[in-house]
Image: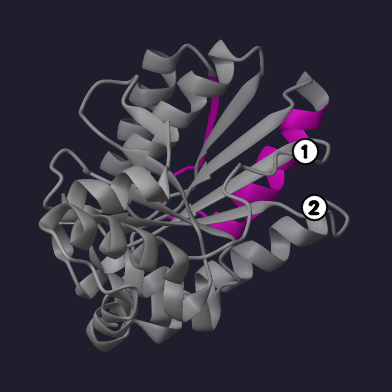
Amino acid sequence: MAARLAAGVRSRAPRTRDEAVEALVSVATSLMSSKPRELQLTGNPACVLLYGINGAGKTTTAGKLAYQLRNQGRQPLVIAADTYRAAGIEQMVAWADRAGVQHLAGSSGADPASVVFDGVQTARKRGNDVVIADTAGRLQTQRNLLEELAKIGRVMTKALDDAPYESLLVLDAVLGLTSLVQAREFNKSIPITGLVLAKLDSSAKGGAVISSESELDIPVKLAGVGESIEDLVPFDPSAFVRAIFD
């Protein structure tokens, strides 16, 4: 990645610092994914699955996204499918209440794929037009647990009668190149449609996303930029790159 950036900048022959920054921004942005960054919320209901390691910010992102969609006139149903941790379920329910949206919580120890399937059916009965499912945290090295997440994806596909849905990997912006490793490994087990860059409250974070997008061609769609429930924004690649290099 560094070599490609350097070669791209040299080809533009910048003569001043400002020209060098502009060249860096232009070249780095061109290396990122060209796929759509808007959430594709189609289907009956539209569905969003959130994956990631423990502590990445999945549950927080689910709550923020539910709040955002409710304010856009949608009727979200949040599914607390982290059935391995009672505290995880409680945290998701608390975020759903804070966002002012409905929720469905799986019982501790229940099959998370079954919880997601029931959640889709419940959404249809209640008239919810968006389902947001928060799954349990997984390390990218836990192949058997990643397979459980893949099972959730297959069950979601079945519940939606093969309609497309968003499958988002939540990455912690603080972790640097570890994020690229996570994206690589999760993408082997789960067909990821987009990334969420959580905890992006400093311009000095998240640079590894450029490598992730370039290598995997998976776009960052959302960014968490603070702790408030309003702090979830569409990802702007040009502004992000400029903040790193400017």
Magenta highlight range: 102-124
Nearer the observer, 21 or 137? 21
Residues at discs 1 and 2 in contact (Cβ within 8 Å): yes
Three-letter amino acid code at the position of disc 2 = Ala
Side of 128 where 232 appears, left or right: left
- Real-space Cα distance between discs 1 and 2? 8 Å
In the rendered image, which residue does mark 1 sit on? Answer: 121
Residue at horizontal 37 percent and vertical 31 percent from the top: 232
Nearer the observer, 52 or 232? 232
Instruction: Name the quadrant containing residue 70.
Output: top right
Q: What crowding class fits label 2: few (fewer than 14 Cα within 10 Å), some (14-19), or many (20 or more)?
A: some
Q: Is residue 107 magenta?
A: yes
Residue 235 coordinates in the image, percent (x, y): 42, 43
Mark 2 falls on what kind of element?
A: helix
Residue at horizontal 18 percent and vertical 53 percent from the top: 244
Residue 129 coordinates in the image, percent (x, y): 74, 27
Compared with residue 97, is residue 26 higher up or lower down, i.e. above or below?
Answer: below
Q: What crowding class fits label 1: few (fewer than 14 Cα within 10 Å), some (14-19), or many (20 or more)?
A: some
State which tag comes first along the sequence, 1 or 2: 1
Three-letter amino acid code at the position of disc 1 = Gln
Residue 106 coordinates in the image, percent (x, y): 51, 42
Q: Is residue 10 magenta?
A: no
In the rendered view of the protein, which quadrant contains the N terminus?
bottom left
Q: Which mark is residue 203?
A: none
Instruction: Name the quadrant containing residue 5.
Output: bottom left
In the rendered image, which residue does mark 2 sit on? Answer: 159
In this rendering, does residue 145 appear at all? no
In this rendering, does residue 66 appear at all? yes
Mark 1 falls on what kind of element?
A: helix
Residue at horizontal 33 percent and vertical 73 percent from the top: 12
Residue at horizontal 47 percent and vertical 43 percent from the top: 107
